[in-house]
Image: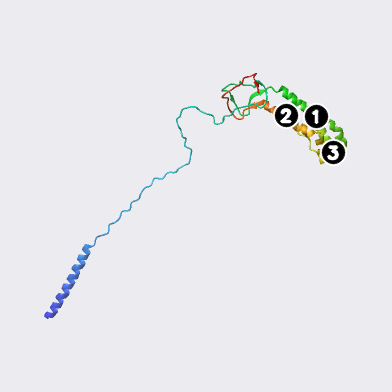
């Protein structure tokens, strides 16, 4: 009987010890902290590309980015061109700045044109009999020819033989010499290469330009 009582007490002690140990173990556990979620707010804006003007305050003298000196390639007396050729005068692109008297040179050009007209006229009988297929175009050329206007382009030969015939009569040489004179005739008028203002004038009306 005593042995049974001892066994029961031992079992009770073990059960009590186990219970106490479990309680002690649970008391040492710490609850995990609950993390609070934070929602961050981000400011968003829509950007648009554009031009931002830069303003810089400055003072001083200005220099033109396009600045040229005008020179005459021909000789003549400076005649009025509509505006006074003075410092500060404004001109638009293509506007006449000055004109040189070209009466003498113009007479030379007219003389050369007349010479070409006569050369072609002397060829007409030969063209009529030897090159009848080209006669009409040369006749029309003579009918439309004027010594007071720009020399028109020569008719195109229809055959190589006709071309050699015209070349042998110095028609082409005379024609290109006249075109060269006409190109030089245009240099008696100087026009503005771009819009701008005259900053210096070394001549006046009536001056002989060389």
Mark 2 against mark 1, which lies toward the viewer? 2
**Along the line of sight, the residue nearer the viewer: 34 or 91:** 91
Return the residue at label 3.
Answer: 133
Relative to 148, 81 lies left or right: left
Mark 3 against mark 2, which lies toward the viewer? 2
**Residue 20 image position (x, y, % from top left):** 18, 68
Q: Which quadrant, please, contains the C terminus?
A: top right
Return the residue at label 2.
Answer: 181
Work out whether residue 146 can be spotted.
no
User: For the residue labelled by badge 3, is the local secondary structure a helix, a strand or a loop?
Assistant: helix
**Along the line of sight, the residue nearer the viewer: 150 or 140:** 150
Residue visible at 22% across and 62% down in the picture: 28
- Which residue is the extreme one toward the front? 210
Looking at the image, tell me whether mark 2 or mark 1 is earlier in sequence order.
1
Return the residue at label 1.
Answer: 117
- Which residue is the extreme one toward the top? 206
**Along the line of sight, the residue nearer the viewer: 8 or 208:** 208
Q: Residue 30 appears in which quarter of the rendering? A: bottom left
């Amino acid at each position: 009987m005593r042995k049974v009582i001892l066994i029961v007490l031992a079992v009770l002690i073990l059960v009590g010890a186990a219970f106490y140990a479990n309680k002690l173990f649970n008391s040492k556990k710490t609850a995990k902290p609950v993390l609070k979620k934070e929602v961050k707010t981000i400011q968003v804006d829509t950007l648009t590309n554009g031009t931002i003007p830069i303003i810089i305050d400055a003072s001083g003298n200005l220099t033109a980015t396009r600045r040229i000196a005008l020179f005459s390639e021909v000789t003549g007396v400076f005649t009025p061109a509509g505006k006074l050729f003075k410092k500060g005068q404004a001109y638009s692109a293509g506007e006449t700045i000055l004109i040189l008297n070209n009466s003498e040179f113009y007479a030379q050009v007219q003389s050369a044109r007349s010479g070409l007209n006569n050369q072609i006229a002397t060829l007409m009988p030969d063209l009529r009999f030897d090159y009848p297929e080209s006669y009409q175009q040369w006749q029309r050329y003579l009918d439309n020819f004027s010594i007071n206007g720009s020399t028109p382009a020569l008719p195109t030969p229809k055959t190589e033989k006709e071309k050699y015939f015209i070349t042998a009569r110095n028609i082409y040489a005379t024609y290109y010499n006249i075109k060269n004179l006409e190109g030089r005739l245009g240099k008696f008028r100087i026009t503005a290469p771009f819009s701008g203002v005259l900053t210096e004038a070394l001549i006046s009306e009536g001056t002989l330009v060389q």
